[in-house]
């Protein structure tokens, strides 16, 4: 191992970005970032959703190209036009959303597009099986090469994804939230594998929201905020408060000011909500909560904590969900979305594109989809009344549109989100369930969405909103519930809450924790 | 067919004009084939030919209207041709035999009763399709392929493959008017065309002005989002297949009345013509987009094209090739329209500085 002449560190720089800027229509995802990836070490990358971590990794892996700035490897400027291109330079990435083929076998998946062949035509199955077995042994997993990937648990699929990168002799391995779906034991194995890879000189980029995990596994840390790097150093001396400070910054973003108003009666009560997940456990495991009219309840937690499933359970999307729901003291019947919307619940889903909007329909048709009954007499829709209602909401929500007849897909993320919120509000809800309402929208639109939320609460609407953004949850909520592993692991009032308390509550039930958390778990 | 909003948004820009032309393309195509055949096919414009041609077109148009709803909802209905055959056989059987209740005498029905019962058969097969697709989660292609075979087999079984001849009805039972459905006219326009107008107006009204129609488009555009918005997805799907079955039953009645006979192989591959008409009229196979008016124009293009080619003496083999080319061209132009349309919307949005 050679010493890096510049810093004298035992970890040479394998790849660096200088002045990296990435512009998307409407937002700047990366602003002039300088990043060094060190070989034989774990380079930890941390930041809130939308801070630019994923964009930066996509640039390195060849999925996206920089708008300006350079990427250099071993002193040479490189320009990856595709993932194949990046792969040839020894860069492998394991995405947060797994890219596997569920109806092919483990061996097929690992050698997809890199099949071991005889003469370029006939796939050498036995060689692939052998190689797969060797990889699995290295990863300490007893997975048969002939198993279908669809039959594996999510954690095992993650291992297959890692094996895929290893099989291509990756010198740089990017892991995007690799532990979000793993059990404690699986995380331990993953960390052993990481140690091994480090010893072989592989440079690892590790993205995670689990701060304690980062401190344990990382050698170097880079913190991103709003597309800029706010802290980069070796892991020595780094603690959670340091990370949080750099993630959030000292000055708060200018969210809407608090309008003080008294709370009303109980608007929503959920008792013992349980929802089974696909791997035999519970995505939501006995959650109870209560919300008063005019109150904003923030639910904080990491990806996979069961927050989305909880909201979907409340709105009635899952017919097999157990547990009772009351809206204004009125007990809900069997889970059914139309019934619960009629009773005063409304959901703003996390995934705007797939769950929130019908992209092919016009803005007008999307907005009124949940409330067509309000301008229908018998079977006849009064389109004039519909248009005026839409115009009214476009004005109230300050949606920037050229015409309500254009397809909703022509709008920017922030305006699309306002269309989804309008759709929910048109049903005249008593309780609004908002899943990551600020995801994928720029800072200006965020502030407007938050202003609307405050205003609605002041008008007496109960709001439950889910977020993984610490600052958002702290500045917007009247009360905060933290979820981890399908359970409620903490509840804080607005006055008593601290970032550190939220972070540690969100990690309860997860792998490598400090003693303090281990105590909490046993308590 | 034309869309007024495109005018309002700014007809001055060249892409908006282009968009207007693209949107009206099926209509333009219809005018072109009309002009072409009136020049090159003798007697094409004669009143008698118009009546015959419109009767041919009507059969496909009924099926295509039902098919449009199904495709807009994100599905496909392959069973309509077989339903036509089966419903024709049911109509023929009821006319000839009534229902034998096994006590030595049988119940006979008048024309209206027969039509209602046949329509119920079509709707029931549609409901079966809906059940398979929503409750048993069978893919629409497979579910309706299954009912295609079942209905065709049932039609064959009903007469052992033989034709029910002489369906002229019986004045004693009030079924002598059955023949009028296919051969009668009102104000000089064939009854079947009046029926087509009624069904077309009804379908267009459902599509544009009722919540049900709105939901059909929403389910086809994004089933998950529609469900989470409170749309009763299952009910919507049941409706589209039942409506399609109803349209097929009407065609079965009309054909057996026109021919004064019911043959179990009637309606073979009709489903493909219906799909072609819907696609030609601008219906997107991926769901969420399509218009009843467009579909009817599409059915006319196909019908006029094939009748006109016959009159010109073009061989049936060439006709088939030409029909295929027209369908492919329609879809290629449709792709271009989508691109231009998206561009116009994005430009208008960009003009707002956002």
Image (spheres, rainbow, N blue to C red):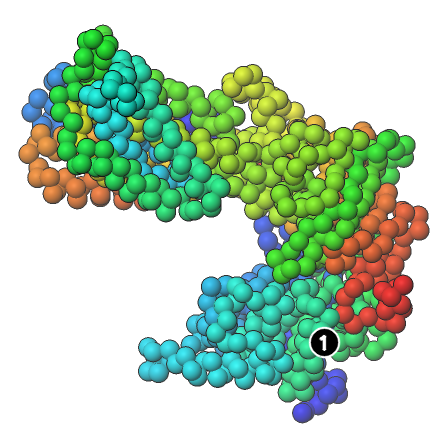
Q: Residue furthest right?
A: A496
As drawn, which residue projects farthest toward the bottom? A1
Q: Position of residue A302 (x, y in %)?
A: 74, 58
Of A471 and B343, the residue lying toward us: A471
- Please name whichever residue, A330 or A7, is drawn nearer the observer in this view of the structure: A330
Q: Secondary structure at mark 1?
A: helix
The residue positioned 60% from the left and 39% from the top of the image is B228
On the question of residue A144 being in view, the answer is yes
Label 1: chain letter: A
Looking at the image, residue B25 sits to the left or right of residue A352; the answer is: left
Q: Is residue A241 above or below residue B167?
A: below
The C terminus of chain B sits in image quarter: top right
Direction from residue B12 to residue A317 in the image, left or right: right
The quadrant of the rendering that contains the N terminus of chain B is top left
Instruction: Identify which residue is drawn at 12% across, 17% down.
Output: B48
The residue shown at (61%, 64%) is A154
Measured from the top left, where is residue A481 in percent x and y? 82, 50
* Residue A486 x, y percent position in the rendering: 74, 55
Is A358 placed left or right of A331 in the picture?
left
Neighbourhood count class around disc 1 (C-alpha, 10 Å): few under 14, some 14–19, many 20 upward: some
Residue A435 in the image, given as x and y percentages of width and height: 70, 46
- Residue displayed at 64% across by 32% down: A339
Which quadrant of the figure has residue A289?
Answer: top right
Q: Quadrant of residue B113?
A: top left
* Residue A406 drawn above or below residue A249: above
Q: Which residue is mark 1?
A: A188
Q: Would residue B60 be seen by someone viewing this image from the given angle? A: no
């Amino acid at each position: 191992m050679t010493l890096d002449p510049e810093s004298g560190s035992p970890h040479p720089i394998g790849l660096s970005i200088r002045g990296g800027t990435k512009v998307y229509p409407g937002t700047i995802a990366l602003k002039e970032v300088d990043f060094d990836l060190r070989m034989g070490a774990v380079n930890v990358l941390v930041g809130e959703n939308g801070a630019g971590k994923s964009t930066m990794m996509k640039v390195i892996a060849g999925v996206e190209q920089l708008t300006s700035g350079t990427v250099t490897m071993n002193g040479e400027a490189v320009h990856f036009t595709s993932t194949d291109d990046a792969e040839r330079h020894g860069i492998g990435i394991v995405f947060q959303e797994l890219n596997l083929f569920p109806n092919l076998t483990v061996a097929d998946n690992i050698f997809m597009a890199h099949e071991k062949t005889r003469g370029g035509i006939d796939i050498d199955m036995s060689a692939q099986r052998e190689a797969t077995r060797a990889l699995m042994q290295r990863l300490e997993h007893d997975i048969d090469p002939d198993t279908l990937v669809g039959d594996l648990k999510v954690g095992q699929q993650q291992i297959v994804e890692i094996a895929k990168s290893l099989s291509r002799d990756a010198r740089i391995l990017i892991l995007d939230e690799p532990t979000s779906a793993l059990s404690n034991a699986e995380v331990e194995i993953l960390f052993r594998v990481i140690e091994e890879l480090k010893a072989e000189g592989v440079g690892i980029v590790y993205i995670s929201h689990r701060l304690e995990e980062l401190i344990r596994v990382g050698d170097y840390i880079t913190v991103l905020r709003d597309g800029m790097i706010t802290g980069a150093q070796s892991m020595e001396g780094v603690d959670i408060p340091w990370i949080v400070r750099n993630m959030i910054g000292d000055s708060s973003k200018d969210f809407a000011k608090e309008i003080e108003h008294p709370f009303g009666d109980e608007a929503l009560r959920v008792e013992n909500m349980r929802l089974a997940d696909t791997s035999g456990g519970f995505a939501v495991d006995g959650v109870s909560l209560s919300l008063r009219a005019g109150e904003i309840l923030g639910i904080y937690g990491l990806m996979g904590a069961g927050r989305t499933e909880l909201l979907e359970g409340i709105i009635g999307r899952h017919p097999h969900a157990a547990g009772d729901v009351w809206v204004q003291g009125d007990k809900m019947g069997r889970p059914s979305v139309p019934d619960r919307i009629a009773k005063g619940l409304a959901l703003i889903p996390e995934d705007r594109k797939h769950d929130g909007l019908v992209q092919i329909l016009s803005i007008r048709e999307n907005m009124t989809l949940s409330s067509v009954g309000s301008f229908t007499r018998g079977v006849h829709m009064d389109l004039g009344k519909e248009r005026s209602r839409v115009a009214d909401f476009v004005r109230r929500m300050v949606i920037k549109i050229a015409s309500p007849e254009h397809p909703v897909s022509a709008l920017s993320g922030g305006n699309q989100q306002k269309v989804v919120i309008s759709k929910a509000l048109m049903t005249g809800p008593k309780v609004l369930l908002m899943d990551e309402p600020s995801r994928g929208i720029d800072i200006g639109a965020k502030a407007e969405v938050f202003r609307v939320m405050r205003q609605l609460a002041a008008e007496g609407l109960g709001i439950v909103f889910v977020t993984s953004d610490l600052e958002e949850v702290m500045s917007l909520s009247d009360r905060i519930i933290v979820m981890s592993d399908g359970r409620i692991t903490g509840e804080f009032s607005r006055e008593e809450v601290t970032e550190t308390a939220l972070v540690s509550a969100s990690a309860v039930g997860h792998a490598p924790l400090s003693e303090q958390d281990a105590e909490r778990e046993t308590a | 067919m034309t869309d007024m909003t495109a005018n309002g948004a700014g007809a001055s820009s060249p892409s908006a004009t282009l968009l207007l032309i693209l949107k009206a393309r099926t209509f333009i195509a219809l005018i072109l084939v009309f002009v072409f055949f009136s020049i090159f096919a003798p007697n094409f414009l004669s009143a008698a030919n118009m009546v015959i041609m419109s009767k041919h077109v009507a059969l496909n148009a009924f099926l295509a209207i039902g098919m449009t709803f199904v495709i807009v909802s994100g599905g496909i209905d392959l069973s309509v041709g077989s339903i036509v055959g089966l419903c024709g056989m049911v109509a023929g059987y009821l006319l000839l035999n009534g229902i034998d209740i096994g006590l030595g005498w049988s119940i006979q029905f008048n024309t209206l009763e027969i039509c209602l019962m046949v329509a119920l058969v079509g709707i029931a097969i549609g409901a079966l399709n809906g059940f398979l697709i929503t409750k048993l989660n069978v893919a629409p292609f497979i579910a309706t392929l299954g009912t295609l075979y079942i209905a065709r087999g049932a039609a064959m079984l009903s007469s052992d493959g033989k034709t029910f001849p002489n369906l002229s009805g019986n004045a004693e039972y009030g079924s002598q008017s059955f023949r009028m459905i296919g051969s009668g006219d009102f104000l000089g326009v064939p009854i079947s065309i009046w029926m087509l107008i009624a069904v077309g107006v009804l379908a267009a009204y459902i599509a544009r002005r009722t919540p049900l129609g709105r939901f059909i488009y929403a389910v086809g555009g994004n089933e998950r989002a529609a469900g989470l918005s409170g749309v009763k997805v299952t009910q919507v799907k049941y409706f589209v297949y039942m409506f399609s079955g109803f349209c097929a039953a009407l065609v079965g009645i009309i054909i057996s009345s026109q021919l004064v006979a019911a043959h179990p192989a009637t309606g073979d591959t009709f489903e493909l013509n219906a799909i072609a008409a819907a696609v030609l009229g601008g219906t997107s196979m991926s769901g969420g987009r399509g218009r009843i008016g467009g579909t009817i124009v599409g059915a006319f293009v196909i019908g006029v094209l094939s009748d006109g080619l016959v009159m010109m003496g073009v061989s049936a083999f060439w006709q088939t090739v030409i029909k295929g080319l027209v369908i492919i061209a329609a879809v290629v132009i449709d792709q271009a329209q989508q691109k231009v349309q998206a561009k116009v919307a994005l430009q208008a949005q960009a003009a707002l500085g956002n």
